[in-house]
Image (cartoon, grey):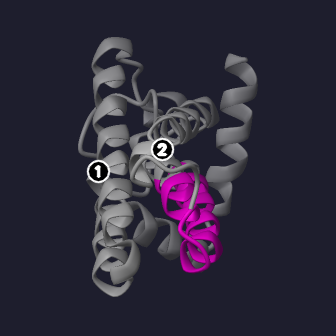
Amino acid sequence: MHDMDHRLLSALRDCGTNPRVAAAARALSWSGEHGALWIVAGLAGAAVDRERRSAWLRGTALTAAAHLASMGVKRVVRRPRPGAHNGVEPLVRTAGRHSFPSSHATSAAAAAVAYGALRPVGAHLVPPLAAAMCVSRMVVGVHYPSDVAAGAALGALTARAGATWMNGGRGRA
């Protein structure tokens, strides 16, 4: 697993040698810091979609909760980030030293599940952007694929667990 993680990271990080890919990955990484993109998206959804305002706000709360959960797991696991010490020069600075799980992937997957249930806008726009966010973390060289996979799983499970609450006690929207 360790060898495969490093090989996949190296291949994805090589994509960042293209200036356009690197710029897009940096922009996604920056916008996803501390779940900011997803929290803003949820608040915007609440402002625009008055009919489902409470669901958007609860989805935003679930996304933030997933992000906080990932930060807690990071403090327990304490896996070091990839870096120059193992041949991966990162393209961005990070807020912390720990890699597992990816908090960007956690909040992105939580938003994809939570906002994706709020059709049609959330279902069409959020999942592809969330997937791009997840890949960007490897392209910029700050997460191993297993960090991203674990983060995405944590985010999706957190949002799915709160789906009934998000929809005011009703099933999916």
Picture residue at 66% right of the left edge, 30% below the top = 6
Residue 69 seen: yes
The earlier-in-sequence mark between 1 and 2 is: 1
| Rendered view: 120 above or below 112 | below
Coordinates of residue 38 in the picture (x, y in percent): 37, 63
The front one of 35 and 148 is 35
Residue 106 seen: no
- Residue placed furthest toward the bottom: 48
| Secondary structure at numbered mark 1 | helix
Circle nearer the viewer, 1 or 2: 2
**The label number, if any, that marks residue 96 in the structure image:** none
Q: In the visual, does 52 lie left or right of 148?
A: left
Q: Amino acid at mark 2?
A: Thr
**The label number, if any, that marks residue 164 in the structure image:** 2
The front one of 86 and 75 is 75
Magenta residues, start to end: 111-137
Q: Amino acid at mark 1?
A: Ala
Coordinates of residue 148 in the picture (x, y in percent): 56, 39
In magenta segment, residue 166 = no
- Residue placed furthest toward the front: 170
Q: Main secondary structure of the magenta part?
A: helix
How far apart, in angstroms, are the residues tagged by discs 1 and 2? 13 Å
Coordinates of residue 48 in the picture (x, y in percent): 34, 86
- Residue placed furthest toward the top: 76
Coordinates of residue 76 in the picture (x, y in percent): 32, 13
| Rendered view: 129 above or below 144 | below
Picture residue at 41% right of the left edge, 72% below the top = 27
Residue bearing mark 1: 61
The answer to whether mark 1 and mark 2 are in CB contact below 8 A is: no
Picture residue at 58% right of the left edge, 34% below the top = 153
